[in-house]
Amino acid sequence: MVLLFLSAVDSAAEWRAELNKLLPGIELRVWPELGDVGEIDAALVWRPPPGLLDTLPNLRLIASLGAGVDHIFADPSLPPGVPVVRLVDPYMTVAMSEYVQLQVLRLHRQDPAYLAQQQARLWRQQPQPNAGQRRVGVLGLGVLGGDAALRLKVLGFDVAGWSRTEKRLRGIPSFHGAAGLDALLERAEILVCLLPLTPATEGILDRRLFARLPRGAAVVNCARGRHLVEADLLAALDSEQLSAAVLDVFRDEPLPRDHPFWRHQRIRVTPHVAAATHPPTAAPHVAENLRRLRDGKPLLNRVDASEGY
Ligand code: NDP
Ligand code: OXD
């Protein structure tokens, strides 16, 4: 089997070693060295250049190097009918939940305010409710959002969630669809975004949504930069409708050096690290789908192209 490999980071050698342990004899062709394109059976990719996958006449599988697939569906000439699968790796799920718990605890325990006070050498104790009095909303209750919501609940937060279709998570009020969004927002003092980026969710974190949150709410976006309307975030922070934001993902990555988010006192920037792909734990999941492709068995974690996730 021949696998085209294309990543934004220098991980080809590690992937080759991991996949060879699991599927001896597999050949990795590392983009841009394609060789005979007719030999390529599958592609394991992150943000493939538009049009590239359509040049592979015998491609039978497109696998995302991450949990998200927006970077694949961004290609308008994606070969029709070729299945797209995404990465679901429990190691990444734990990593994302660690990130969400860390940032929600920081916001809950007034870390942004204490950081500003430290810079001003100001000794002032902020009001501090218990976690049970802190209402957290999670947008997206899939693999990552569902796990993060449950772990926030274990920390004692008053958690609710929102998804496209109805969900039942123990102890977590769950709202769904456009009609359920208001009910989630009006109770979300800390809002965590873990939605996939699709035409339905692009720009969802905008001024209308911020206005529906309780005054002084904080936002954590660890999904995709294009969920956020950047100017609306800055305006909401200026007007104090929002008190703080934590951003792991951006419209332009790396975040340009002159971007106002870098210097903003109430924005915490991290460089898309909430849940990075980890080849040793991710490779078995990729290998399993390659085996299934070879053996003509149903693929795991296939995404619905019509929904875009
Ligand atoms: P899933 O597909 O498992 O879950 C997506 C969730 O979003 C589901 O609950 C789904 O609803 C909900 N959803 C989708 N569309 C809508 C909509 N229009 N309205 C309401 N809810 C909607 O994805 P994951 O949890 O695995 O990943 C989520 C995203 O996290 C990825 O797409 C990626 O962009 C991002 N990510 C970021 C990383 C980082 O390091 N910053 C790392 C990994 C992922 P339903 O359950 O009804 O289908
Ligand atoms: C992903 C990511 O989608 O790292 O996995 O953003």
Image (cartoon, grey):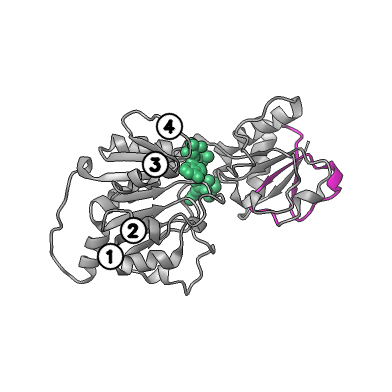
Q: Position of residue 277 (x, y in %)?
A: 55, 45
Label 3 element class? helix
Find disc 1 in the rendering and name its residue.
Answer: 240
Q: CA distance from mark 4 to mark 1?
A: 33 Å
Q: Is-magenta flag for residue 110?
A: no
Query: Which comes before the other along the chain, label 1 or label 2?
Result: 2
Q: Position of residue 191 (x, y in %)?
A: 35, 50
Q: Position of residue 234 (x, y in %)?
A: 38, 68
- At x 63% / y 35%, what residue is drawn? 302
Badge 3, how many Cα within 10 Å: few under 14, some, many 20+?
some
Label disc, if present, on residue 167 of the rendered structure: 4
Mark 1 or mark 2, whichever is nearer to me: 2
Find disc 2 in the rendering and name its residue.
Answer: 211
Q: In the rendered image, is residue 92 in sight?
A: no
Badge 4 amino acid: Lys
Q: CA distance from mark 4 to mark 2?
A: 26 Å
Find disc 3 in the rendering and name its residue.
Answer: 180
Query: Which comes before the other along the chain, label 3 or label 1?
Result: 3
Query: Magenta segment range?
Result: 24-49
Observer-nearest of 161 and 263: 161
Query: Which comes before the other along the chain, label 4 or label 1?
Result: 4
Query: Which comes before the other along the chain, label 2 or label 3?
Result: 3
